[in-house]
Image (tube, grey):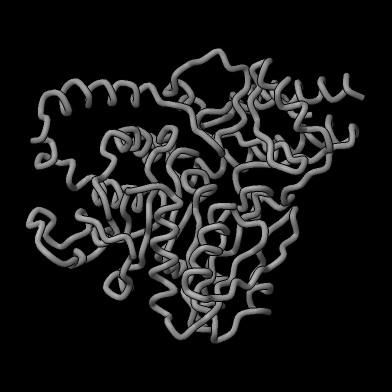
Amino acid sequence: MTDPTALDAADPLAAYRDQFLATDVVSYLDGNSLGRPLKATAELMDEFIREQWAGRLIRGWTDEWWEWPITLGDRLGSIALGAANGQVVIADSTTVLFYKLARAAVDARPHRRKILIDQDNFPTDRYVLEGIAAERGLELVWITTDPVAGIEPAQVADVIDDDVALVSFSHVAYRSGWLADVAAINEIAHAAGALTLWDLSHSVGAVPIELDEWGVDLAVGCTYKYLNGGPGSPAFAYVRDDLLAELRQPIQGWIGHRASFEMGPGYEPAKGARGLLSGTPPILAMVPLHANLDMLESAGIAAVRQKSQRLSAYALELADEWLVPLGVAIASPRDPARRGGHVTLQKPGFDTLLERLWERGVLPDYRRPDGLRIGPAPLSTSFTELHTGMSLVRDLLSRAD
């Protein structure tokens, strides 16, 4: 078995762990659900409240806050999304932005009656599309995927036709960690005249993304996982440049108006990505993104991905050595090219194990019916920390048996 201290000694990103606030947690293995806070985040929040909010008050809007949804969106696009300026905004929650883009997409294909989605996609995405289908009298075409893998291009090709308006999947599957072939699926969808909407929530900040290069039409994602934006931090939306003038999002609010402060009659959308906005931007909740984008830009997404692959490979090595003999199954791709940042382990009874792990300071998470997700965050998790957490899973399972 590989020595975790040797892996840590050889880790070029090891020093980044010192940028996170220390806690008494023994092993944090849920970075794919909620990232740790940075020391710089605490400093920025204090500075913002004391100086910008208290000091500038309403003047802060004209200083810079008004532009944050766009300027932060551009920066996120450049550092983590492979998106040129003017296509990304920070606003709302993932659910709200997903609704906006999905509704805009099907409205832009008014004579098409179908939406493609897989049955194991994240619940929000499925629920929102169910609601839109009911609103618009559309048909959802459900694709059944391998629960240990995820959506394959061939599965899309088998069911798509010229009546499909929208194709929507997750870049990284929330259960298995399957990394979809975005470019190939986009090509299939576009050949049929459909638009694509990708959920990047489980990939952004851990996996390199090239939205422009892959020909993605629309994308959304959260910022509280690998981007460490904090609980409920605002989401982001991407609309390909040439679609911005064509699509019209359905939640018409004053911030998305072409002249917000005229407050006149009738809605006229702002040009470009600003037209994706609705209500007052969550400025305070955007502050942590400044710190994390600085860190991510410094580390480089390519190096982050390499560390992520090494961490997930080590998790699989430990699982094979310690847990598979105890009846645990691996429910994630073995191929690192098809695996995102987390690994899922399966065994009936894992739900009862979770509380005992948490009591001892080891924090993975659980997904029904019997999946324990191991999600080490590349910039905050050491190999020793991963080893420690997995060893407690082994010890508790051994006692149970």
Residue 170 at x, y percent in the picture: 56, 57
Horizontally, residue 135 falls left or right of residue 74, namely: right
Q: Nearer the viewer, residue 64 or 310?
A: 64
Horizontally, residue 394 falls left or right of residue 98, namely: right
Any part of residue 111 in sight: yes
Any part of residue 5 in sight: no
The quadrant in which residue 102 appears is bottom left
Q: Nearer the viewer, residue 254 or 119?
A: 254
The quadrant in which residue 230 appears is top left
Quarter occupied by the C terminus? top right
Quarter occupied by the N terminus? top right
Q: Which residue is drawn at the image coordinates 9% and 53% (left, top)?
A: 261
Q: Nearer the viewer, residue 390 or 302?
A: 390
The quadrant in which residue 275 appears is bottom left
Residue 361 at x, y percent in the picture: 64, 17
Question: Above or below — where is 335 with respect to 119?
Answer: above
Q: Which residue is drawn at the image coordinates 30% and 75% (left, top)?
A: 246
Question: Above or below — where is 271 with respect to 285?
Answer: below
Residue 187 at x, y percent in the picture: 53, 76
Question: Above or below — where is 318 with respect to 269?
Answer: above
Question: Above or below — where is 159 with respect to 398?
Answer: below
